[in-house]
Image (tube, rainbow, N blue to C red):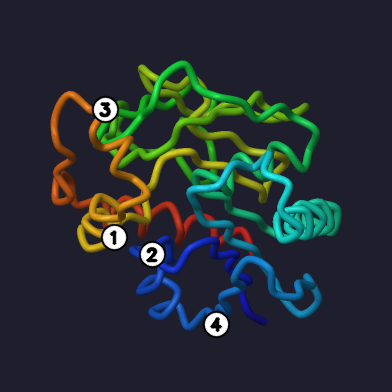
């Protein structure tokens, strides 16, 4: 069976995750926003980032929220990154709203005590540096286990049950992806607001991305 990958923009793809899925011989299928969507025939869901808000009244996002609810109800493993983490939270009834400040670039992420014994996030140095690009955040869904935070954003990672994870930071980012995001004309305003330019090659997070994704795949 394949993993369903919800992709909201061509430039926000699997990145560091792609080679891991290939090496594990785990098939995956991209689903682009607005296409017909169904959970049948998939054994996992990865929800990637995007420039839109989880609160935007887009029919495609409404369909994704229903699919997320369905996947969680069926106990199918779900992994949400950035917008994906916000969509999981919203699907479970939590509030998504503007963060106090933009968080863009390489920032440290601190792991909570609960993360030390977590099946996916245990064993990582605290702090570890990851790439960020978001202006919104979320309340934790009911019964969520809080797993990580940063100086600018309290909710950086959480777990629902055993198989559902929301991660705000971009562990999947590659240098090429970061360069494309920085060069996108739609991001010029946010880039201009920063105190210093974003270094696309700041940290190689591929090893951490591999560990996290492999740990999540082991939950299947």
Residue at the disc numbered 4? 27
Q: Position of residue 185 (x, y in %)?
A: 31, 52
N-term mark: 2 or 4 = 2
What is the distance, in whole Å, between disc 2 and disc 3 at their CAs?
22 Å
Q: Secondary structure at mark 3?
A: loop
Check contact, mark 4 vs mark 3: CB within 8 A.
no
Residue at the disc numbered 1? 177
Q: Secondary structure at mark 4?
A: loop
Q: Nearer the viewer, residue 142 or 177?
A: 177
- Tell me which corner region of the image, top left, top right, bottom left or bottom right, holds residue 88: top right
* Mark 1 surroundings: few (<14), some (14-19) or many (≥20) residues within 10 A: some
Check contact, mark 2 vs mark 1: CB within 8 A.
yes
Residue at the disc numbered 3? 193
- Residue at (61, 26) in percent of width and height: 97
Residue at the disc numbered 2? 11
* Mark 2 surroundings: few (<14), some (14-19) or many (≥20) residues within 10 A: some
What is the distance, in whole Å, between disc 2 and disc 1 at their CAs?
7 Å
């Amino acid at each position: 069976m394949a993993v369903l990958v919800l992709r909201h923009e061509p430039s926000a793809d699997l990145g560091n995750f792609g080679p891991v899925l290939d090496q594990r011989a785990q098939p995956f299928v991209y689903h682009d926003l607005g296409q017909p969507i169904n959970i049948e025939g998939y054994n996992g869901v990865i929800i990637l980032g995007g420039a839109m808000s989880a609160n935007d009244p887009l029919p495609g996002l409404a369909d994704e929220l229903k699919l997320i609810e369905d996947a969680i109800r069926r106990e199918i493993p779900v992994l949400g990154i950035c917008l994906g983490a916000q969509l999981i939270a919203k699907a479970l009834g939590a509030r998504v709203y503007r963060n106090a400040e933009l968080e863009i670039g390489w920032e440290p992420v601190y792991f909570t005590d609960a993360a030390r014994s977590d099946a996916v996030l245990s064993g990582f140095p605290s702090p570890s540096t990851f790439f960020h690009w978001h202006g919104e955040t979320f309340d934790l869904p009911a019964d969520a286990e809080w797993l990580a935070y940063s100086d600018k954003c309290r909710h950086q990672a959480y777990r629902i049950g055993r198989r559902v994870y929301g991660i705000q930071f971009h562990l999947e980012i590659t240098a090429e992806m970061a360069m494309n995001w920085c060069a996108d004309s739609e991001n010029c305003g946010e880039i201009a607001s920063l105190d210093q330019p974003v270094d696309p090659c700041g940290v190689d997070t591929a090893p951490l991305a591999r560990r996290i994704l492999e740990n999540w795949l082991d939950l299947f």
